[in-house]
Image (tube, helix red, strand yellow):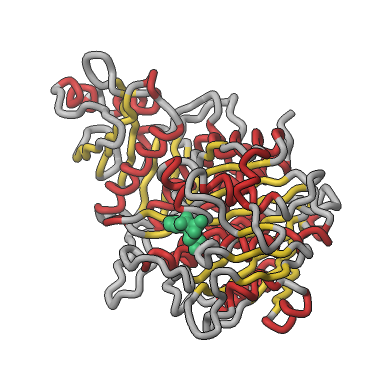
Amino acid sequence: MEFSIKSDMPGSLHTDCVAIGVLAGEKKPVLTGMGKALDKAAHGAIQAILDKGDFSGKTGSCQFLYNLPGIPCERVLLFGLGKAEEATNGSFIKAIRAAVKAIAKTGAKEAAIALEGDSDLPARIRLATLTAADELAGKSRTTQKEKTATLKKLAFWHGSDKKRDRDAEEKALREGEAIAAGVKAARTLGDLPANQCTPVYLASAAEKLAKSYKMRCEILDEKAIRAEGMRALLAVAQGSRQPPRFIVLEYQGNPQKGKKSAAKKPLALIGKGITFDSGGISLKPPAGMDEMKFDMCGAASVLGVMEAAARLELPLHLVALIPTCENMPGGSATRPGDVVTTLSGQTVEILNTDAEGRLILCDALAYAKQFEPAAIIDVATLTGACAIALGRIPHGLFANDDALAAALLAAGKAIEDKAWRLPLWEEYQEGLESQFADLANVGGREGGAVTAACFLSRFVDKKTPWAHLDIAGTAWKTGREKGATGRPVALLCQYLLSLAEPAT
Ligand code: BES
Ligand code: MN
Ligand code: ZN
């Protein structure tokens, strides 16, 4: 898919389909600036059709028009933007998604979508590019017949206007494309079944990424993991025939292009990479267990973010750390009650082998120390409780630092990949008391997302800003639309963009 920005005059816009947004007005739908310009070229034919009342302008609604006078395009698509006063990033995305879906169903090879938003056109372009690319990417399936999309070129169309900042618009387009590539990579890895996406496979995906973008990649195998002392990770891995891996992927900006990392101290990104979570000896119930192939979506999103950052040559220093293994029952599996010594030196009583995410993450958090990170962000499909608490709209966000939390919340809002902060109060810590070790790996059922975050907090230095994103409810969709979402790649990329160019 090729994206571009166009500013042809309405009467000379040659493309297979031009899409214009229509607002839902008080009494009848209202054409926006670009729509008015197109209507003028069509001698009022569009407004005449709207006056008939067949199209409401409701968000997500679509209506094709053909053979309009004065317009050289085969089709004109009206897409509803909803009520102007109720417009949000969310409704904008919904409208763009619907329009792209409708266009893709036709035989159109190239199309143009009119964009308004004089206030912040670049942000709209970034969001629209990301949305369109995501909609067109579809799902990665293993089926015999794969449909190939006919739509090859998509332009965002805005009238020529001297006040526009062309460079900022082009930059936003490239950012949207890069973020979309990261989201797609995360979705593809997430959707892969556990018999294909093994820990070794994830490691090879990281190595491939490192080769394409000149990043440093180090893969610790089982022996190296043991030598390092990551026994919590090994305890989770030991029930499976699939050997574990620990992935270190480092990006330092692009010195050749003068885009060297601004700060010496890196940002550490940690992703949970459980390629399948059966629960282990604390076996999960069978219903929906297939979805536990998505338990490596944290790892996939971290790889997606690294890809996007490298593509954009962001002047940042990033270290991705991915503990990856499979959580299976078996003769050599960890038993409830087993005690292990983690890399941090703290001992953990594993009361429930299904609370495995925090075990592999606690060793990664301890491993991160040697990089003296400026901040740490971990991403994990950590608790069903988080999905119960927040549903499938926002990620759960926990942080020991208000500024980091605020920056992540703002980034999520800006790119419509929202998070919601939950408390990380001391009072919750006592749930993790153990009679036999420094701490237990589970607290009670209540507040499960918080106690999981509390467990992780024990492995983070209090002086290091740290955030934990629980993506259990957001990393994939269930039901008829089952599939990885690629979230929170967009949130994290938007956050990295804000770090790379602090607002002036
Ligand atoms: N991967 C799961 C969390 C999960 C469950 C994500 C369902 C999405 C949907 C995690 O490893 C897990 O099993 N957590 C347990 C923790 C419990 C044993 C304290 C859970 O949420 O039930
Ligand atoms: Mn589990
Ligand atoms: Zn899990």
Residue at (51% x, 72% y) in the render: 327
Which quarter shows the C terminus? top right
Q: Residue furthest right?
A: 264
Residue 5 in sight from this viewpoint: no
Where is residue 45 drawn, in percent x and y?
Answer: 21, 26
Q: In the image, is residue 347 above or below residue 95?
A: below
Q: Nearer the viewer, residue 468 or 120?
A: 468
Residue 51 higher or lower than 70, as above or below: above
Q: Residue at x 56, y 64 (%)?
A: 351
Q: Residue at point 30% right, 32% down? A: 59
When asked about the image quadrant of residue 39, the answer is top left
Question: Which sits in the foreground, 161 or 233?
Answer: 233
Q: Is residue 95 above or below residue 179?
A: above
| Quadrant location of the N terminus in the rendered image | bottom left
**Residue 29 appears in the figure:** yes
Q: Nearer the viewer, residue 147 or 400?
A: 400
Residue 427 image-quadrant placement: top right
Q: Is residue 413 left or right of residue 167?
A: left
Q: Report x, y in % for residue 502.
A: 73, 35
Residue at position x 47%, y 64% from top?
190
> 392 or 100: which is nearer to us?
392
Residue 17: x %, y % from top left: 31, 45
